[in-house]
Image (cartoon, rainbow, N blue to C red):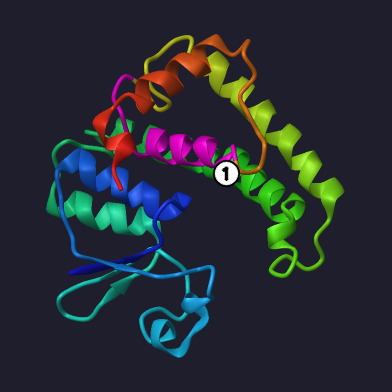
Amino acid sequence: MKLYETPRTPNPRRVHIFMAEKNIDIPRVAINLATAEHKGDAFRKVTAVQRVPALELDDGTVIAESVAICRYLEELHPEPALFGRDAKERALVEMWNRHVEFYLAQPIFAAFRHINPAMAAMEQPQIAEWGEANKVKAVDFMRVLDQELANRAFIAGDAFSIADITAICVVDFGKVAKIAPPDDLANFNRWRADVSARPSASAT
């Protein structure tokens, strides 16, 4: 297998953390987004959507979504379980991971794409007002998570999961969009510190 990726970007980082939690090592191929390498003919042959990460299996099959890659790796390496240990946990992990994607990741990415001048060529039209509105949406959902985390250690329950991986990747990326968790979110900031202290959070 080999993993096509771009270091330090949120979705490849999800896979890095996931692999680190399971002590998995896969050969990697760096794709340079700054030079639009992902838009070239060579990478188009890897995946039609031309996005990273993409996992190419030994038989040539390509899995080209970060969570799909993580699900595949979970099947091969079920411990520790990062998608839940039974039907109830799996449903809750799925629910919270999707909540994080919809209500935290999407606003943070929209803010970055619509406010950062470096994204002007890629985001047409670039609407600064929409970017600012999404900064508010992202912080609003951090407040939702703060309330939930008053009652449990991690986003989907008492065990670390893909939902926590998704959340820490997008919250950290929020720095680029100038979105910071407010200081009064004690539970959220406790969770962030705990997850950031895990060795996997520093995986590259």
Q: Quadrant of residue 87?
A: top left
Along the horizontal axis of the image, is 94 left or right of 80? right
Q: Is residue 47 above or below residue 153?
A: below
What is the number of callouts on the image?
A: 1
Label 1 CA crowd tier, 10 Å (few <14, some 14–19, many 20+):
many
- Estimate the x, y position of residue 71 in percent, counting from the top left: 28, 53
Can residue 49 be spotted in the picture? Answer: no
Taking the magenta stretch, the answer to whether it contains residue 60 is: no
Q: Which residues are magenta?
A: 158-175
Q: Which residue is mark 1?
A: 105
- Estimate the x, y position of residue 59 in percent, counting from the top left: 16, 80
| Helix, strand or loop for disc 1 | helix
Along the horizontal axis of the image, is 36 left or right of 83? right
Q: Main secondary structure of the magenta part?
A: helix
Can residue 41 be spotted in the picture? Answer: yes
Residue appearing at x 63%, y 20% in the figure = 143
| Quadrant of image for the N terminus | bottom left
